[in-house]
Image: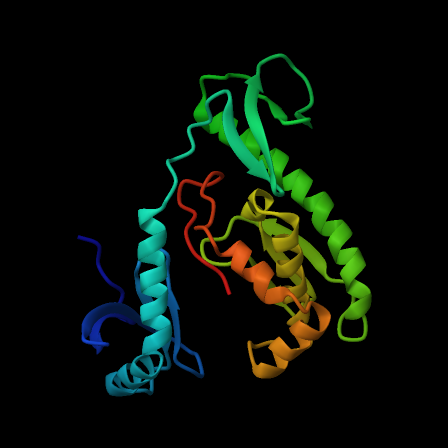
Amino acid sequence: MKKIPKNKKIQTVILGGREITYECTRKKVKNINLRVHSDGKLFVSAPFFVSDQQIDAVLTEKKDFILRALARFAEAEKNKPMPFSFADGEKISLFGKEYRLYFTEEKCRSFAENDTLILFVRDKKDTEMKRKALKTYAENELRLLLDSLCADIYPLFEKATPMPEIKLRLMRARWGSCAPKKAVLTFNTNLAFYPISCIEYVVMHEFTHFLHANHSKAFYNALAEKMPDWKERKTGLNAVPMVDILSKDTKGDAF
């Protein structure tokens, strides 16, 4: 059995008549923070000085958010698509357009043409090799798109930050993140499997954090000013579970 670190503890709380189990981690933070993962697990980080009762009080205050998130993830799990098999002819959506995916051992540059995506691999029988080929292609195409979007959006925020460094990585629970002090924006590679309008929303969302680091009313007012239809775009992004193709352990939801 895996040993739980001393600063972590499994606890329970009654929310809406349900017993909810959560993992609480004590650390050097100022506030009690919580996150619901897409697997239905609730995680809490809390300062060393607060009591269990104070943590439960915060969870009770946030019960509507927690219960909605748990219900949403439970529904998403029921509607979860079949695992991607990397078989020739399998359908895949990139930037809102559907393609038939094929792999070839004939050395060439991977390319998309009409409704077909062809990726070069040394061994078509190696699923992991095919996964990596798709990841490389998705990252390269997403990088080109993000560079263009960020260049277009940056003039709206140039008084708040120097042009940020753009990074890509697979993330378990976020579409993107912003490090204002470092002027760095990081985006989830899985965005390549969503429509461009949704990607535009994530880029604008993260840039807005250079104006307001939190998700305060002022943040959303600024976001609405820059992108009036952000709610519709967000709904489209979160309408389905995060696509799990590039990583065997990619989980989560965002914003």
| 44 left or right of 102 in image | left
| Residue 132 against residue 74 in the figure, above or below | above
| Residue 195 against residue 154 in the figure, above or below | above
Residue 6: image quadrant is: bottom left
Q: Residue 220: where, in percent of width, then height?
A: 61, 76
Number of marks drawn = 0
| 95 left or right of 52 in image | right
Q: Residue 101: where, in percent of width, then height?
A: 55, 25
Towards the viewer: 132 or 209: 209
Q: Residue 233: where, in percent of width, then height?
A: 59, 59
Residue 48: image quadrant is: bottom left
Towards the viewer: 62 or 167: 62
Residue 44 visible in rendering: no
| Residue 106 against residue 222 in the figure, above or below | above
Residue at (47%, 54%) from the top-left corner?
239
| 106 left or right of 54 in image | right
Q: Residue 37: where, in percent of width, then height?
A: 37, 60
Residue 103 visible in rendering: yes
Q: What's the colour scheme?
A: rainbow
Residue at (43%, 47%) from the top-left corner?
250
Instruction: Name the residue at the top extreme.
Output: 106
Residue at (34%, 71%) from the top-left corner?
66
Towards the viewer: 94 or 50: 94
